[in-house]
Image (tube, grey):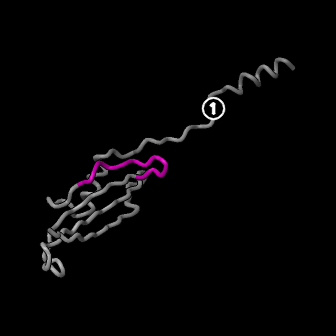
Amino acid sequence: MRLLSFFIFLFSFHPGSFAQSEVTESKMKAEDVVRLVQRRFPIRTRTWNFDSLPVWNAAEKNWTISIYQYKHSNRGQCKYTNGCTIVRHLIVVINDNNKKIISKNLNRSLFHNYE
């Protein structure tokens, strides 16, 4: 009986008996995410700027990248002021497993240039 309990004690510390830890490393690099977004969206012009490097979300296994564009306009109500600044902000979320775009959100803001 002691021998049996001793073997049970030894096999309880077997490495296969512990739970596996979840992998939180990404399959894609930040440069791959930037290239994927540049291929998918027409942001090759000089007016689009990357807000920052892509951000890795380990809990959801997603990459998030933010891109913005500034333009000046004198149309509509902007012609009565000193013009307007138009800001377009694009937020793209990419799945790391299959390298597909999950969501894209384009926000447009108009700011009057009062002096």
In the displayed image of the protein, which residue is found farthest to the front? 115
Please report the bounds of the magenta region as a residue range: 50-62
In this view, 16 is above or below 66: above
For the N terminus, the quadrant is top right
With 6 as the anchor, is 33 left or right in this view? left
Residue 52: x percent and y percent?
A: 28, 50
Query: Where on the picture, by quarter, is residue 37?
Result: bottom left
Q: Could you tell me which residue is drawn at 27 percent across and 58 percent down?
A: 67
Task: Assess whether residue 51 is covered by the magenta stretch.
Answer: yes
Determine whether, in the image, residue 96 is placed left or right of residue 112: right
Direction right: furthest residue = 1
Give the quarter of the figure containing the C terminus: bottom left
Residue at position x 77%, y 25% from top?
A: 8
Label the magenta part by its dominant secondary structure: loop
* 77 left or right, relative to 56: left
Q: Is residue 94 magenta?
A: no
Up/down of 92 relative to 15, above or below: below
Mark 1 falls on what kind of element? helix
Residue for point 62% across, 37% down: 19
Q: Quadrant of residue 106?
A: bottom left
Q: Position of residue 90 (x, y in %)?
A: 30, 63
**Between 85 and 95, which is closer to the camera in this rendering?**
85
Instruction: Find residue 72 and report its image quarter.
Output: bottom left
Residue annotated with mark 1: 16
Q: Measured from the top left, where is residue 30 in percent x and y?
A: 31, 46
